[in-house]
Image: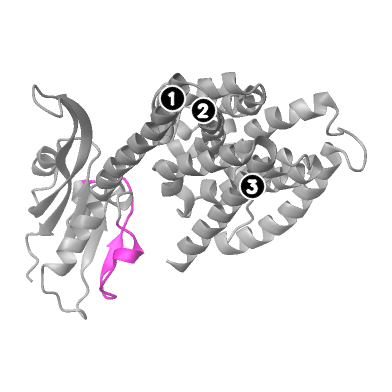
Amino acid sequence: MLIRTTLGLINTVSLLYFARSVQWCFGRETAMFLRYILCSQFHFFFYLSRPLPNSFALCLVMIVYQRIFEERYRSAVRYATACVILFRCELVLLFGPLFLGYLILGKLKTFGFDGAIAIGVRIAAACLALSIPIDSYFWGRPVWPEGEVMFFNVIENRSHEYGTHPYFWYFYSALPRCLLTSVFLVPLGCLSDHRVPKILVPSTCFIFLYSFLPHKELRFIIYTIPIYSLAAAVFCARIYVNRRKSFVRKLLNYGVILHLIVNVACTSLFLLIASKNYPGYDALTFLQHHHRFDARKPVTVYVDNACAQTGVSRFAYLHDAWIFNKTENLKPEDLQHFDFLTLGTYGSNLREEVETKFMKYHRPLFFVNAFHEHKIKTSKSFPWVYPSIVYKEKAAILKNKNYRF
């Protein structure tokens, strides 16, 4: 809890510094609406405190943009290089287009002792000298973590082993879910201020280039959300400042306020969905709390991949004598000696899978219903259109037939 709180505070402070630089560059109203828009969204703050490399990199990305808005380009290169070497190597696809424009315009020198290349080389060497010894110590072998990530994704091209999405998935699914109704204001922001398209181009290029990687996750582009939100904030600020000049602009101002309200409503729905999206944790917690166990008696529990990704972690372990095994790709015959099996699915046929594969040595103790999908339904009466959440069996606890409580 302390670690996650610290990480969340670090990212929040970096975001506030970014908003302050936006105020310096675009005005107080734009910075105000940027804060409102980001606070009304779900996914950005959902990831702020999660201990992921993307969350660690996010604070440095915000500092890079802050330095650029303040025209401190050499400092921005330093933070960008550290971010790439230490946390997420693919961010070179974001920083490359970002700094290329300033190199072409002559605002940032390419060569020389204080040029971008020399600064990048010095910072990269310092970061490698820091990363390799520390990470090698903890991993127990010589390793540069981001180098391995780049080798796995780019050279071996094995990211598809963790699932794939279509090329344009980030644009038609991830971005709209992150930005919510603010996504409709991004093009209007580009029309409101000629500086906005220049800021959006590097982020858009980054997403286009990164889309070639078949494995896609929303967290991979989380750094671009404040930039697209900034475009929406520019339009909102323009409408707010001119709201008294005409009746149409007053209506548009009400529309701006309404879009924030709709964002908050959608975020509330996402919060409800997220609370029902950890069936692995629910299953293990139910097992540990609703049955009497001798705390000194060893109990063996197998945790499959789906449950391990939906909440079964060391935070949920209550009994020191219990032995958990998360070895992947074990066959049903390999599981016969486990007292309990914690099994999950991302599909909708868990009960059928359990009954066909695992009934020889175990029997189902209970199943856990969790979020499966959400739909938009219509009705002939008010409210006519409303969201509906579909729950399905997503996790199960199986007990060995020979085990006795």
Image location (x, y in percent) of residue 284: 21, 60
Q: On the image, numbered disc 1 is attached to which residue? A: 252
Quarter-wise, where is residue 101 in the image? top right
Image location (x, y in percent) of residue 116: 82, 38
Q: How is the image coloured?
A: one colour
Q: On the image, numbered disc 2 is attached to which residue? A: 239
Magenta stretch: dominant secondary structure: loop
Mark 2: which amino acid?
Ile
Q: On the image, numbered disc 3 is attached to which residue? A: 20
Contact check, label 1 and label 2, Cβ < 8 Å: yes
Instruction: Tell me how far mark 3 sits from mark 2, CA to CA.
Output: 21 Å
Which of the pair 102/134 is nearer the observer?
102
Q: Earlier in the sequence, mark 1 or mark 3?
A: 3
Nearer mark to the viewer, of 3 and 2: 2
Mark 1: which amino acid?
Leu
Residue at 22% in and 74% down: 298
Which of the pair 71/396 is nearer the observer?
71
Q: Is residue 224 left or right of residue 84?
A: left
Tell me the magenta residue range: 312-331
